């Protein structure tokens, strides 16, 4: 079972790498953009096609497409929701044994100017660490994203049943090894 | 500026392709010039521009009525009936219908559903429609009141009903010109019903493939008969009167009858062409009544033969189906052709589907007459039967069933 999971996440890793390179490329052009009187990040960013995975308790994850319509790169530094006592911004990376694992991303999610960052199973996502109550399919969950300029963006997404998104999770303490996300 | 299409996995790929197909209409002067140049080149090379793909065609999802009723019938139809799980309550029904509505709204427009694991299968909608119907159990669980006719049809003498093709709390009618599109939509919708309901029965049907004959051609069943000639025509006041309900939460909705009718092709084979035409009262060639020349000629039930017998026999299907002016229905059936069992070489039939505002007033009297006498009963056996209330459509942001559930 572990092996199957690895195969799947490894295949996704290739796609993710392409996405990351592409984003980096776009970011480079955006760097040249003028920095005059830019609007707060929270006004430039929208989330499309967002959803969060149904779960009875424990952890879950939220996905969607974050688009930055502004003229400078923005960084999501944190997220909050009434649905979970703690949230983390996660990336999925390959560890030293070649296994794809998710972990908290350093410095938050960067959404380049005029571009879109896709949060998806097997890639970047917003992790709900400890659900307050069961997330049931068809419920709606509100999140507040906070950006590096302290501006915020509030969004509401539906809960969906989803069998995937069971990546291994490496907690903040690297020593304690992988931990399975319960879904 | 746009990154390369890493997202064959995202909705964007679908809309990108459609925008491309729309060409200069959306993309401005430069693109228009490019398309023009392309066309010129093709013309020089003696080529014709590519036909738009049927797979890209969409049927609007939002509206007063649900799609899939007045929609010109697609080539493939799947009917799935579900039973609500014991614990599913009214609040759960709201959550389920919100999710299913969102799935249907996206998939019918050629966009992957949220959390769609196979988004590549969603980008060719091929006129996909998803139509929801509520059985008596759904309305009860919603603590609502259904129309009086929302109940099993009365027992008919000809029926040999198999419970595995009867009843159901929630019906999904999923239809498109492409069977892969239908399968994917069904898979996506059923994944999202799993927390609330379980599949009770499922029936797969087909008509002519897209492009085989002109749109609007009346379907043929596996007896070879033209089936549905007297249907009211969508878009007319007549159709609206026959089909759409104006009662309470069902305003803008309709009543739906789904009956699985086995057709015994092996005994039908013994009947000569004349006998076949007499049994229905129409010519097989073009569906014209035995008193007429064209399919849509009105049957003349008074006409008699030289020796005084009715030209359209008393026992014929066409004569028996005809009743009071209000006893009319809109048929939207599909053929089925299952794997034969035992010594038989066929197990075929019709997924009879009719829409009418009031099942008891419009459908039941017709079926009662056919039950008493219809020569076609010799070769047909109803084996499944279900009645659903098809709620009205919804606007963007709303959900199907909101008139009952909110």
Image: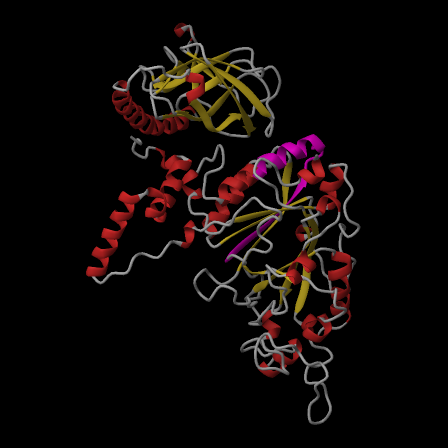
Q: Which residues are magenta?
A: B75-101
- How far from the left and from the top, in percent, is residue B398? 61, 36
Q: Nearer the viewer, residue A45 or A14?
A: A45
Identify the residue at the far front of this view. Answer: A37
Q: Is residue B75 above or below residue B56?
A: below
Q: Is residue B310 left or right of residue B335?
A: right
Q: Is residue B220 left or right of residue B378?
A: left
**Numbered marks: total:** 0
Magenta stretch: includes residue B45 = no
In the figure, residue B46 lies in which quadrant? bottom left
Q: Is residue B8 above or below residue B359?
A: above
Q: Nearer the viewer, residue A66 or B120?
A: A66
Q: Is residue A32 above or below residue A137?
A: above
Identify the residue at the far bottom of this view. Answer: B306
Q: Is residue B383 left or right of residue A4?
A: right
Q: Residue at x 61, y 21 (%)?
A: A134
Q: Is residue A166 above or below residue B152?
A: above
Q: How is the image coloured?
A: secondary structure
Magenta stretch: includes residue B85 = yes
- How far from the left and from the top, in percent, is residue B271? 61, 79
Q: Quadrant of the C terminus of chain B?
A: top right
Q: Nearer the viewer, residue A100 or A85?
A: A85
Q: Quadrant of the N terminus of chain B?
A: top left
Q: Residue at x 60, y 21 (%)?
A: A56
Q: Residue at x 45, y 60 (%)?
A: B210
Q: Is residue B89 visible?
A: no
- How far from the left and from the top, in percent, is residue B66? 60, 48
Q: Is residue B207 visible?
A: yes
Q: Residue at x 46, y 61 (%)?
A: B209
């Amino acid at each position: 079972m572990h092996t199957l999971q690895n195969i799947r996440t490894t295949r996704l890793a290739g796609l993710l790498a392409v996405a990351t390179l592409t984003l980096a490329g776009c970011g480079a052009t955006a760097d040249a953009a003028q920095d005059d009187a830019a609007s707060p990040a929270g006004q430039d960013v929208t989330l499309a096609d967002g959803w969060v995975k149904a779960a009875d308790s424990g952890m879950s994850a939220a996905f969607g497409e974050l688009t930055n319509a502004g003229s400078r790169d923005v960084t999501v530094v944190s997220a909050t929701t009434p649905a979970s006592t703690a949230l983390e911004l996660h990336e999925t990376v390959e560890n030293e044994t070649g296994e794809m694992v998710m972990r908290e991303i350093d410095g938050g999610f960067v959404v380049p100017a005029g571009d879109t960052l896709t949060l998806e199973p097997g890639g970047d996502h917003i992790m709900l660490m400890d659900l307050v109550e069961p997330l049931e399919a068809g419920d709606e969950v509100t999140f507040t994203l906070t950006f590096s300029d302290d501006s915020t963006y509030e969004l509401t997404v539906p809960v969906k049943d989803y069998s995937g998104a069971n990546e291994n999770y490496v907690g903040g303490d690297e020593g304690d090894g992988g931990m399975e996300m319960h879904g | 500026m746009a990154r390369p299409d890493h997202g064959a996995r995202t909705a964007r790929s679908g809309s990108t392709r459609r925008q491309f197909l729309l060409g200069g209409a959306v993309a401005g002067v430069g693109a228009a010039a490019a398309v023009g140049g392309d066309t010129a080149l093709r013309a020089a090379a003696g080529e014709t521009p590519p036909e738009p793909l049927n797979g890209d065609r969409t049927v609007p999802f939002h509206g007063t009525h649900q799609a899939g009723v007045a929609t010109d019938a697609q080539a493939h139809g799947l009917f799935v009936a579900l039973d609500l799980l014991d614990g599913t309550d009214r609040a759960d029904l709201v959550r389920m219908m919100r999710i299913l509505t969102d799935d249907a709204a996206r998939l019918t427009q050629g966009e992957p559903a949220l959390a769609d694991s196979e988004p590549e299968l969603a980008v060719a909608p091929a006129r996909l429609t998803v139509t929801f119907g509520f059985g008596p159990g759904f309305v009860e669980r919603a603590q609502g009141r259904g129309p009086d006719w929302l109940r099993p049809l009365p027992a008919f003498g000809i029926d040999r009903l198999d419970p595995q093709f009867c009843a159901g709390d929630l019906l999904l009618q999923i239809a498109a010109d492409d069977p892969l599109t239908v399968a994917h939509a069904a898979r996506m919708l059923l994944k999202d019903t799993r927390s609330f309901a379980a599949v009770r029965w499922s029936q797969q049907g087909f008509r002519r493939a897209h492009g085989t004959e002109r749109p609007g051609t009346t379907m043929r069943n596996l007896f070879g008969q033209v089936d549905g000639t007297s249907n009211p025509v969508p878009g007319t006041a007549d159709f609206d009167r026959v089909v759409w309900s104006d009662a309470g939460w069902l305003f803008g909705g309709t009543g739906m009858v789904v009956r699985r009718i086995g057709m015994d092709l092996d005994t039908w084979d013994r009947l000569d062409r004349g006998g076949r035409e007499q049994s229905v009262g129409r010519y097989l060639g073009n569906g014209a009544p035995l008193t007429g020349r064209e399919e849509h000629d009105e049957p003349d039930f008074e006409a008699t033969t030289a020796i005084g017998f009715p030209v359209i026999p008393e026992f014929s299907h066409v004569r028996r189906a005809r009743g009071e002016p209000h006893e009319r229905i809109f048929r939207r059936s599909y053929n089925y052709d299952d794997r034969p069992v035992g010594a038989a070489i066929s197990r075929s039939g019709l997924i009879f589907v009719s829409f009418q505002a009031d099942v008891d007033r419009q459908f039941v009297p017709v079926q009662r007459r056919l039950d008493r006498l219809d020569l076609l009963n010799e070769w047909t056996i109803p084996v499944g039967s279900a009645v659903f209330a098809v709620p009205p459509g919804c606007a963007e942001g709303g959900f199907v069933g909101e008139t009952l559930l909110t």
